[in-house]
Image (tube, rainbow, N blue to C red):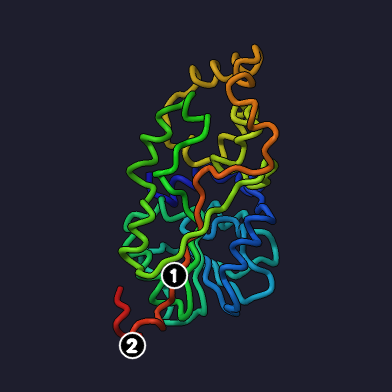
Amino acid sequence: MAENALYDAIGAGYAKLRKPDPRIAQAIHRALGDARSVLNVGAGSGSYEPTDRAVTALEPSAEMIRQRPLGSAKVLQGIAEDLPFADLEFDAAMAVLTVHHWTDLKAGLREMRRVAKDRLVILTFDPSTPYFWLADYIPEIAELDKPTMPELSVFERILRKTTVETVPIPHDCTDGFLGAYWRRPHAYLDARVRSAISTFAKMGDVSNALTRLASDLSSGVWEDRYGRLLDAESLDVGYRLVVAGGGAELQTPASVTR
C-alpha cells in the first residue's frame, strides 16, 4: 500500500492517539542542533516539529494534512523522493518514523541531503533488534517489517558518516506507535489503538493472536512470562535516531543530485 493511501486509510483518529512524547521530542530537537530552518519530511499531523524554529512540512496524505492543528507549520503535499525545494534551502531536514513507507529510500535520503545544508535527523526502527514480546503472539510482525525497515548500514552507505543513537521508549509513551505499549499489553487489544499503527493496517486478520493475548492477560500467563517489564521505566525496543551531515558537506551544491 502506498504511503499516502495507507495514511488516508488509518489517519482518521491518528492525531488523537499519536501525540508526540516529550522525551522523544527532546532527543530529536537536540539532534537538530542550532538549525534555524527545518524541513519535516513525511510530517503527518505535525508530531515532533520544533516550535522555536522555522519549520516547513511535507506530507503525501491529505487526511494527515487535514489533522494538522491550527497554527502548525506550513505544509505542502508531496513525497520525499521529489522534494519541491531548492538546493540547500533549509538548515536541516528531519524524518520521523516515515522512511519505511517511502517507495525509494535512496532517492528520498538524497533529496533530504540536497535541500538541507547542515544535517539530517531521522527517527527509524532497527530491524536487527530482537522484537519485544508482541512478536511472540504475532510473529508476522517481524516478517512484515523486514522488507520495508531499512538496516542501519543502509543509511551509512547512502549518507556516509552517520551517527546512531538509541532512543529508549518510556513506559508511558504518549505516541502510540507499535512499540509504545510494551508495558501496557492491554492496549494492543483496543481496535482504536491498533487503527493508528501502520503495521496493523498492513497485516491480515490477527484476531486469533489477540484472543490468545487476552486469555494470557486474564490468566496471569503474560505476567508470569514478561512481568519483569512492569518495573522498567523505559526499554530499548529498536528505535534509533540517525544523524548525518547535510549537502553543504559535499564539495559543491551541484554535486548533490536528485
Dot label at residue 244: 1
Depth check, front residue: 59 or 113: 113
Mark 2 surroundings: few (<14), some (14-19) or many (≥20) residues within 10 A: few
Residue 60 tag number: none
Q: What amino acid does circle 1 point to?
A: Ala
How packed is label 1: few (under 14 Cα within 10 Å), some, or many (20 or more)?
many
Specify whether 3 is left or right of 178: left
Q: Give coordinates of residue 253: x percent, y percent.
A: 35, 85
Q: Which residue lies most toward the bottom here?
A: 252
SS under mark 2: loop
Q: Tell me: 31 left or right of 159.
A: right
Quadrant occupied by the N terminus: top left
Q: Are marks 2 and 1 in contact (CB under 8 Å)?
A: no
Quadrant in the rendering for residue 141: top left
The residue nearer to you, when weighing 229 against 125, is 229
Say whether residue 200 is left or right of residue 67: left
- Relative to 156, is 234 above or below? above
> What residue is pinned by disc 2?
252
Height in image: 18 above or below 187?
Answer: below
Q: Quadrant of the C terminus?
A: bottom left
